[in-house]
Amino acid sequence: MLILPFAAFACTPPSHASGDLPAPKVDAPATQTSTPQTAVFAGGCFWCTEAAIAELKGVSEVVSGYSGGSAETANYEQVCTGRTHHAEAIKITFDPSQISFGRLLQVFFTIHDPTTLDAQGPDHGSQYRSAIFFADADQERIARAYIKQLEEAKAFSRPIVTTLEPLKAFYPAEKYHQDYARENPDQPYIRQWAAPKVEKVRKKFADEVKSKP
């Protein structure tokens, strides 16, 4: 087996204080339009977040990549140094008539730990930070409101450190990173870390998971 140089054992369970996370009180208004929208989140290892979010109805594509830094440093080798300002991120293309931005946030906060600064599990560095890269004022407003809601509900046992950053650009990662969990289901890391996240989504958001062929 080819073992890629990947220090991304980042997908540890969130430090939920108790129970499931509440649905957002502030969200985008219901819409009948199916014009695709995008959201960019960072929550540690993009293998894990990509695999989990891709399970959801209304999500047509999830791309692993980098956001927060420049085009010149948007490659895995440089991002791994932690000096590029990039975060390992995912770009989600979704149908707002099937799933809202707020609902995506709820899933995002369920599958990663937003209370560890510049780290997920044993991975440390700003490239593993918890971040929401908002595309417009509405996304920023909804994200800020949801973080405040989670803090007031004491949904986590530690303070949330997720950053809100304006989306300046998103750069797709190298081809071998795309659909990595689906393409490599028997890889030990995928079995230990990504698969449980996928199962969590299937269990906690069962009505919103895509039907399997």
Image (cartoon, rainbow, N blue to C red):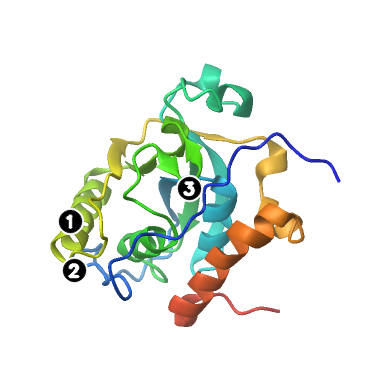
Relative image position of residue 77 (x, y in whole percent): 63, 24
Location of residue 130 (image quadrant): top left
| CA distance for labels 2 and 1 | 8 Å
Work out whether mark 2 precedes mark 3 in sequence or the reverse, and give the earlier one.
Answer: 2
Residue at figure coordinates x 49%, y 71% from the top left: 201
Q: Amino acid at mark 1?
A: Ala
- Mark 3, Cα crowd under 10 Å, few <14 / some 14-19 / many 20+, is some
Give the farthest residue toward the bottom: 207
Relative image position of residue 123 (x, y in whole percent): 50, 39
Foreground mark, 2 or 3?
A: 3
Left or right of 176, for residue 99: left
Dot label at residue 25: 2
Left or right of 2, for residue 27: left
Element class at badge 3: loop
Element class at badge 2: loop
Give the farthest residue toward the right: 1
Q: Is residue 205 visible?
A: no
- What residue would you read off at disc 1? 145
- What residue would you read off at disc 3? 121
Location of residue 54 (image quadrant): bottom right
Q: Is residue 150 above or below residue 64?
A: below
Dot label at residue 5: none
The number of numbered badges drawn on the structure is 3
Relative image position of residue 128 (x, y in whole percent): 46, 38
| CA distance for labels 3 and 1 | 26 Å
Q: Is residue 43 visible?
A: yes
Residue at figure coordinates x 61%, y 37% from the top left: 7
Work out whether mark 3 precedes mark 1 in sequence or the reverse, and give the earlier one.
Answer: 3
Could you tell me if the residues under marks 2 and 1 are in contact, i.e. CB atoms within 8 Å?
A: yes
